[in-house]
Image (spheres, helix red, strand yellow):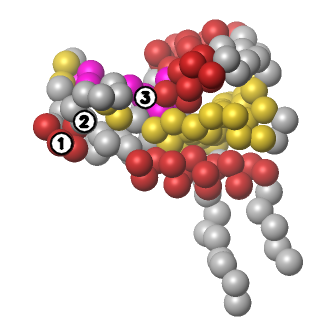
Amino acid sequence: MDRLSWQDYFMANADLISKRSTCDRAFVGAVLVKDNRIIATGYNGGVAGTENCHEVGHKMEDGHCIRTVHAEMNALIQCAKEGISTDNTEIYVTHFPCINCTRAILQAGIRKVTYKSAYRPHDFAIELLKVKGVRFVQHDVPTIQLGD
């Protein structure tokens, strides 16, 4: 029996979670992992209880949709709300984190970032990850065959 690696498993979950995104500029999913266990997930969308991009359109400012809370932030906020430590965790995300998410990831104590797509990687985000010694690796989801 072929079995998914942990890396494949978590990235496949991030990919699936991205399908809940409500901002069609980028369908992003994130999975926070500690000791090979998922502790939180997030996808990009509007603030809970407010309108979403897919309902009313984008709210653009300086080329960014400001209506959207990013997937990484939603996963971190879920941990904060539930009192779950993010120290020494890993994050799997479908897109390379933006500079704001990168700063939050670093402040949260995340030690490794695995991303699927190198979507607009910011030079300073890369610099910060290197300075802090946080590993970042690109990893695509494999094609998953179910049954025979």
Q: Mark number for residue 55?
A: 1
Q: Find numbered disc 1 in the image and state the secondary structure of the residue it sits on.
A: helix
- What's the residue type where badge 1 is placed? Glu
Identity of the residue drawn at 75% across and 27% down = 89
Q: Is residue 91 toward the left or the right of residue 53 in the image?
A: right
Q: Which residues are magenta?
A: 63-73
Residue pointed to by mark 3: 70
Bin the neighbour count of mark 1 within 10 Å (Cα to Cα): few under 14, some 14-19, many 20 and up.
Answer: few
Taking 10 as reference, is 34 above or below it? above
Identity of the residue drawn at 57% across and 19% down = 81
Q: Find numbered disc 3 in the image and state the secondary structure of the residue it sits on.
A: loop
Q: Nearer the viewer, residue 7 or 77?
A: 77
- Of the 4 image quadrants, the one containing the C terminus is bottom right
- What's the residue type where badge 3 is placed? His
Q: Mark number for residue 52?
A: 2
Q: Earlier in the sequence, mark 3 or mark 2?
A: 2
